[in-house]
Image (cartoon, grey):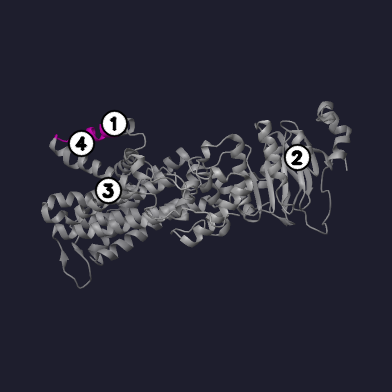
Amino acid sequence: MPRGRQVKLPRLFAGRSVPIYLVALGVVVWLVALPFGSSGYTVGVVGRILTFGLFVASLDLLVGIAGLPSLGHGAFFGIGAYAAALLAQDVTAVGPAQLAVAGAIGAAAAGVTGLVTIRSRGIYFVMLTLAIGEVARQLADSWTSLTGGANGLAGVPPLQLFPWGGEIVIAGHIYWYVLAVTALGYGLLAVVRASAFGQALKGMRDNEDRMRALGYSVTGLKLAVLVVAGGFAGVAGSLWVTQLRFVSPADVGFATSAIALLCVVIAGRGSLWGSFVAAAVVIVVRDELGTVIGGRGPLVLGLTFIAAVYLLPRGLAGLVPSVLRQPPKPALGTGGAQ
Amino acid sequence: MSGPVSGPVSGPAAAPAAIEVRGLTRRFGGLCAVDSVSIRVEPGARHAVIGSNGAGKSTLFALIGGAQRPSSGSVYLGGDDVTGLAEHRRAQRGLARTFQHANLFGPATVAANVALAVRRWLGCGYRPWPDRRRERAVSDRVAQLLETVGLTGRAGTPAASLSHGERRQLEVAVALAAQPSVLLLDEPTAGMAATETRRFVELVQALPQTLTLVLVEHDLEVVFGLATHLSVLHLGRLLADGNPEEVRADPAVRAAYLDARSLAS
């Protein structure tokens, strides 16, 4: 028995070489320093990109890692957003409290609806999640006393960090709050992916029946990943409201879910950083470029997706040369494949 | 023991059988794929189930493993009734199986395939944070299992790139990871080249005697080389059950399944 055999552990940043560290460091520095040299508008755009990126990353955990193609993930984003808005209006404007509640409600909602969806596979799973997303949008639309109906909830009170603290209204400060929460979420998602649980999710994606034969509870895994992804989506929804101070049924609807799913496709399955880059592409094309070219944003977005699917079969993640991504392989790695 | 056997073969025995099925029946509409089959597999046995295509072997395996539920009858694992237990619960109780179509986790490496099974067995399969110390234990065990099945050199290869024979070896490593008491091998040498088959038989022969093996197999050379006990299925019914010599001599088996040429070998 080769006791002393050298083995590689699936740890954070394992298998990445120095240039990637430098690129990552550069991006982080740029993100932190952004408010010093940019307009409040630019800062707001990047903040929205970060938030939407976190939402896409939560969906990627479902789709890319666990192999569960959800078309209703926007429901949990929206539920988190409404929860945060209602909390801010009626209870507390303290941001972290909103995050916690929105995350918990998003996770709980994902758990309850998950009880229905986990027994289905493939196209049936897609249809069920689509239906759940539509039910959520309908609720947001018609439960006027709670959600404000089609008008949504406007004038959400500004962010506070502490109950005794002042209101935070400066764009750069809100942005730093969003950046900090996003970074925390990114870290947590990276940890979950690298863990045994993450490996089990990939196993389920690759061969569900075999996982069952190994003694894994596939329904348990599905429910767990739905809850985790729903929680992160709820947190992203809460951050969204913190920035826009407005939420409407559109945030819950099919468009949100579908665009996030297309972001996952652009990003490349299972790529955490790709989720954020794809979110940037979509937000810039839809919200910024769209206004410049007279509302043809969705058209350009559609062309972008078609181009991405044809030109980037493995998504943005496939663009990085493998030389950069991985140093020479040790003989025995138990960490699995992307 | 020969001739058609149906209904309970034995009452409560002194030592519990590794696997026992009693009056097991599985109907698909009008078709009775497995028809009141009762088989007792002794601990440590190399028990082969043979029969022509459509005899119900695969269905019997699915019923034992828990992938399918019987229309009637019961399955006992180590003396406990597991008929109502889900597949993964049976796996946790020491029942492992390899699959007829060796489809593992294709994109993952050989080592990662085995690691998934090892983690489950070590009880850290769901842990949502990285755990260095556990991972070291996992890696040690993975290395050990790969050594057992002779795949040490292929640890870093994606499972999808393995040859057919190697994939079968990986199947065994994955199945052994849970330290099962019973291992079900579903047509393990199907589609293998002669040299691969020989190597595989050696691998199976080297497995510990405490492990009970049940195999479905078409290759009679493999069956008679390995098995200490044979059950013959024919059209869903148990045609014969006994040690290889008895079964070889059974006229009903001769008539229904084993042709003279393969018996002569």
* Whether residue B184 is situated above or below residue A182 in the rendered picture: above
Q: Nearer the viewer, mark 3 or mark 2?
A: 2
Span colored in magenta: A293-307
* Whether residue B179 is situated above or below residue B265 in the rendered picture: below
Tag 1 near tag 3, CB within 8 Å:
no
- The numbered disc on residue A297 is 4
Number of marks drawn: 4
- The numbered disc on residue A251 is 3
Q: Decide whether residue A297 is among the magenta residues.
A: yes
Q: Mark 1 highlights which residue?
A: A307
Residue beneath the point at 51% across and 60% down: B134
Please report, as a chain letter, where disc 4 is located.
A
Q: Nearer the viewer, mark 1 or mark 4?
A: 1
* Same subunit: marks 1 and 3: yes
Tag 3 near tag 2, CB within 8 Å:
no
Mark before the other along the chain sequence, 3 or 4: 3
Mark before the other along the chain sequence, 1 or 4: 4
- The numbered disc on residue B1 is none
Rendering coords of residue A316 (x, y %): 31, 39
Q: Mark 2 highlights which residue?
A: B49
Q: Nearer the viewer, mark 2 or mark 4?
A: 2
Could you say which is closer to the camera, residue A247 or residue B210? B210
| Badge 4 amino acid | Gly
Give the spatial CA distance, label 3 vs label 2: 59 Å
| Badge 3 amino acid | Asp
Disc 2 element: strand
Q: Is residue B258 visible?
A: yes
Disc 1 element: helix
Rendering coords of residue B178 (x, y %): 61, 54
